[in-house]
Amino acid sequence: MARGRFISLEGGEGVGKSTQLTALAQALEGRGLKVVVTREPGGSPGAEAIRKLLLEGDEKRWNPRSEALLFAAARSDHIEKTIVPALERGEWVLSDRFLDSSLAYQGEAGGLGIDAVRDLHRFGSQDFLPDRTLVLRLEDDAEGAARARVRDGNPGDRIGSRPPTYHAAVDAGFRAIASKEPDRVKLIDAGGTAATVTARLLYALGDLLP
């Protein structure tokens, strides 16, 4: 049996990741692929327990290093318990966020440095990487913020509710990662209709599709 493929979907707040994750899964299933949809932080029992620690509570609950360590621990469990077994069964795994979120959020915006956070991943998860990472982006930051407010109907979790300067740094982090790893990481325009964005995602996966 051929090994499955691992695809991560990334982006800042309000870019439509949840909508596109569902649409992309349906499109791949329509091509006869078996798809597992998962998320980070979370995706396995241990990682889901860590998710609550990360996303709930006061903004100052964790310092940047503690936050990065918790994400790395959750990711290690997620890979071992959920992602690798599915790939070995020949399934495609779609994850709502993965390593590149940690690189952009904690590494770039959090000030730890992308290389330092990548080192944590090398230790905790043996540098396990997606076959393809698709980063949804909106050139208009205000549009993304408006989408997030409509989606959440509340101030958001302790990370999503951080100030605009933080989220601008996150976007800069994603762009820096894509420039260094252009074969793995693809920047996708998240503007336009949902169907148009899904078509862009499928095009970016064209060389991996059977």
Image (cartoon, rainbow, N blue to C red):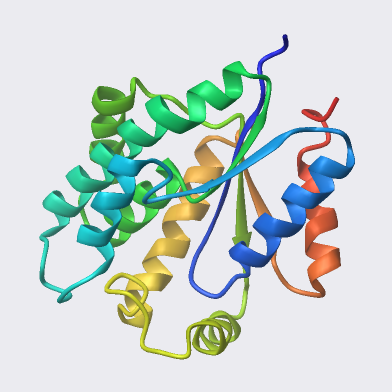
Q: Nearer the viewer, residue 140 or 48?
A: 48
Residue drawn at (72%, 12%), measured in percent from left and top? 2
**Residue 107 visible at all:** no
Q: Looking at the picture, does residue 172 appear above or below residue 50?
A: below
Quadrant that contains the N terminus = top right
Residue drawn at (48%, 53%), measured in percent from left and top? 174
**Residue found farthest to the front:** 45
Q: In x, y percent, where is residue 93?
A: 61, 36
Total residue callouts: 0
Toward which corner of the image does residue 95 lie, by quadrant? top right
Q: Is residue 179 left or right of residue 210?
A: left
Q: Nearer the viewer, residue 165 or 66?
A: 66
Q: Is residue 110 left or right of residue 192?
A: left
Q: In x, y percent, where is residue 10?
A: 54, 54
Toward which corner of the image does residue 146 lie, by quadrant? bottom right
Q: In x, y percent, where is residue 63?
A: 10, 60
Residue drawn at (61%, 29%), measured in percent from left and top? 131
Quadrant that contains the C terminus = top right
Q: Looking at the picture, does residue 114 appear above or below residue 189?
A: above
Q: Nearer the viewer, residue 210 or 110?
A: 210
Q: Is residue 202 left or right of residue 63?
A: right
Q: Is residue 116 left or right of residue 98?
A: left
**Residue found farthest to the top:** 1
Q: Looking at the picture, does residue 147 appear above or below residue 9?
A: below
**Residue 5 visible at all:** yes
Q: In x, y percent, where is residue 182?
A: 61, 37
